[in-house]
């Protein structure tokens, strides 16, 4: 420090000195950090001993330090963990660095209450700023759960149950969560679930379970916002990614999906619930050997909306239903939830751009919308899907309206938007009409 700093410096010089001091403190290496190993909390890691308490204790320690904490799950070991809730808030950012395996007990009978009633295995609640990484494996060892499921009757070895199996890794009411560069496999039910979370990343993941395992969704997004799901390879028995509840700003990019049920928005509005899913953008998807490609599904009698979605740059191979909107038979004689005539989840402002490949069935495009709430402002641009055997595929539309641009194969069956506008009251049309061109462009991130 120059001696002049002892005298009252001009205000600007003071600012410069403070800024310089901050710059010295900023580099990450200077930040205090605490390194912990699960083994230091009594974990055995032989796949037999109960390491649950060790994980709970290690989490408590990590959560309580005022430093940026790394908690290591050592490699070449298997830590057997029973259902556990790891709660926040924690004092500082935590990195759970998983290099080894975390495994679940194999038999549902070993779970509390004999495994009844859904629930979850690794449950994080109310946590902020947590990263899971490290190249390791989270293995739900779900085979016995699947065998119990009535949805897998052909393989059932035990009495079947309709009760949901546990979610393997579930983040609830969290923010600033990154799950990166690990393997999630053989979950009892969905592999990775975010409920009411924000600022989420699920990147560089490998998610696998057998094609015939029931309900093993890859990434399940429930009422969450600002979610990035990128550079992942997902092959499971159910949806690769599903998005439900009140979710917004969800981005998918560079996903390999299949086998499984593809990418699903919904089902929305089940049991007359209200769901609002919007600002969903996905591109660079490789979808193969799946039940659906990109699907929007809503249930009869629900309400809310599914809109502002962009599906672009998708290569489909042997996908049974490449492009689907399924509003079931939402009808106006259902008892509405909330609004007077709101008996369907409205669907609109959805674009499909640069989608090519093959369909395993004759019908490549299905827009099955309802009379109560026709689908509007759909757009098809540069879509070319043929049957896997080379034959022409077909498109089906029911109360679906929008436009097609460029090459669209099979031919678009969308009704013209102005037809729809003539059918609805002038005031509603005016309210909806103005947003058409703006829709979706503002959320380009
Ligand atoms: C494993 O340890 C946890 C925590 O101590 C306990 O709740 C659970 O019941 C234990 N499981 C078995 C099967 O002993
Ligand atoms: C199936 O349920 C029946 C009746 O509850 C019981 O007698 C039988 O032992 C069960 N079988 C298995 C494999 O759990
Ligand atoms: C069903 O049984 C077959 C043959 O034993 C096995 O390969 C497959 O993984 C089983 N599926 C599930 C979901 O357990
Ligand atoms: C979505 O938000 C609405 C209004 O805030 C709420 O009534 C509804 O229960 C929410 N839906 C879900 C699935 O959380
Ligand atoms: C809807 O209701 C049915 C029958 O009551 C139930 O089995 C199902 O789990 C419910 N679904 C949801 C999403 O709440
Ligand atoms: C929808 O309506 C059609 C014709 O009314 C009927 O054939 C079909 O079974 C209905 N589908 C569902 C899922 O209710
Ligand atoms: C609700 O539906 C009834 C019968 O279909 C119709 O007469 C009425 O105009 C609708 N109300 C609104 C607000 O759309
Ligand atoms: C659509 O794709 C098929 C198969 O790749 C190709 O043969 C055909 O020329 C394409 N059609 C158009 C109009 O681009
Ligand atoms: C397939 O579609 C193309 C282009 O629309 C058409 O020229 C051709 O005749 C169709 N082939 C068959 C077998 O329908």
Image: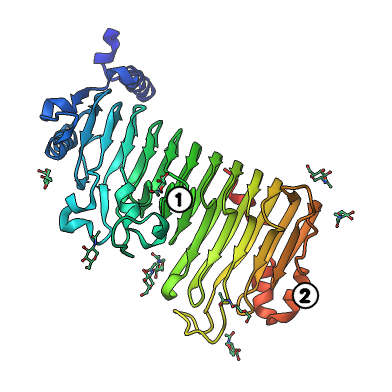
Does residue 417 appear in this view? yes
On the image, which quarter does residue 402 sit in? Answer: bottom right
Image: 233 above or below 87: above
- Residue that numbered label 1 is attached to: 212
Task: Specify whether tag 1 is near ligand 3 (CB below 8 Å).
Answer: yes
Name the quadrant of the C terminus: top right
Contact flag, marks 2 and 1 (Cβ < 8 Å) = no
Question: Which residue is rendered at x = 28% and y = 18% of the image?
Answer: 30
- The alpha-carbon separation of the residues under discs 2 and 1 comes to 44 Å
Image: 5 above or below 283: above
Question: Which residue is rendered at x = 41% and y = 54% of the image?
Answer: 214
Q: Is residue 132 left or right of residue 323?
A: left
Circle 1: element type:
loop
Q: Is residue 187 left or right of residue 445?
A: left
Residue 90 or residue 257, whichever sits in front: 257
Residue 206 or residue 30, whichever sits in front: 206
* Residue 365 locus on image (x, y percent): 69, 59
Image: 97 above or below 434: above
The local crowd at label 2, few if under 14, some if 14 to 19, many if 20 or more residues have their Cα within 10 Å, is few
* Residue 46 locus on image (x, y percent): 18, 29
Residue 156 or residue 123, whichever sits in front: 156
Q: Is residue 404 left or right of residue 42?
A: right
Question: Which residue is rendered at x = 37% and y = 46% of the image?
Answer: 191
Does residue 197 appear in this view? no
Residue 32 or residue 204, whichever sits in front: 204
């Amino acid at each position: 420090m120059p001696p002049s700093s002892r005298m009252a410096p001009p205000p600007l010089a003071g600012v410069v000195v403070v800024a310089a001091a901050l710059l010295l403190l900023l580099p990450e290496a200077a930040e205090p950090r605490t390194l912990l190993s699960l083994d230091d909390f009594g974990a055995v890691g032989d796949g037999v001993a109960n390491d649950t308490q060790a994980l709970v204790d290690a989490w408590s320690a990590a959560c309580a330090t005022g430093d940026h904490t790394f908690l290591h799950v050592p490699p070449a070991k298997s830590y057997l963990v029973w259902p556990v809730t790891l709660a926040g808030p924690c004092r500082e950012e935590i990195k759970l660095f998983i290099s080894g395996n975390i495994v679940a007990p194999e038999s549902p009978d070993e779970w509390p209450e004999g495994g009844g009633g859904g629930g979850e295995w690794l449950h994080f609640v109310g946590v902020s700023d947590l990263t899971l990484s490290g190249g390791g494996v989270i293995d739900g060892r779900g085979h016995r759960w699947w065998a119990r499921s009535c949805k897998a009757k052909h393989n059932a070895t035990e009495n079947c149950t309709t009760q949901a199996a546990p979610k393997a890794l579930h983040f609830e009411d969290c923010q600033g969560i990154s799950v990166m560069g690990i393997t999630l496999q053989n979950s009892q039910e969905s592999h990775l679930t975010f409920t009411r979370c924000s600022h989420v990343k699920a990147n560089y993941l490998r998610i696998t379970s057998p094609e015939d395992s029931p309900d093993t969704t890859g990434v399940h997004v429930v009422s969450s916002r600002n979610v990035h799901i990128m550079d992942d390879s997902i092959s499971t028995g159910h949806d690769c990614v599903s998005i439900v509840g009140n979710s917004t700003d969800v981005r998918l990019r560079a996903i390999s999906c299949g086998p499984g049920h593809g990418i699903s928005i919904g089902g929305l509005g089940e049991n007359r619930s209200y769901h609002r899913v919007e600002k969903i953008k996905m591109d660079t998807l490789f979808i193969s050997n799946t039940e659906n490609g990109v699907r929007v599904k809503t249930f009869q009698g629900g309400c809310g909306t599914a809109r502002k979605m962009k599906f672009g740059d998708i290569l489909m191979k042997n996908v049974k239903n490449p492009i689907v909107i399924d509003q079931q038979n939402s009808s106006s004689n259902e008892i509405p939830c909330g609004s007077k005539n709101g008996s369907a989840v409205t669907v609109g402002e959805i674009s499909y751009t640069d989608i090519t490949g093959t369909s395993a069935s004759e019908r490549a495009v299905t827009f099955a919308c309802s009379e109560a709430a026709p689908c509007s402002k759909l757009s098809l641009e540069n879509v070319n899907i043929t049957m896997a055997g080379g034959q022409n595929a077909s498109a089906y539309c029911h109360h679906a309206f929008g436009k097609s641009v460029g090459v669209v194969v099979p031919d678009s069956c969308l009704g013209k938007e102005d037809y729809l506008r003539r059918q609805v009251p002038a005031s509603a049309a005016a309210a909806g009409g103005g947003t058409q061109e703006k829709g979706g462009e503002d959320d380009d991130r």
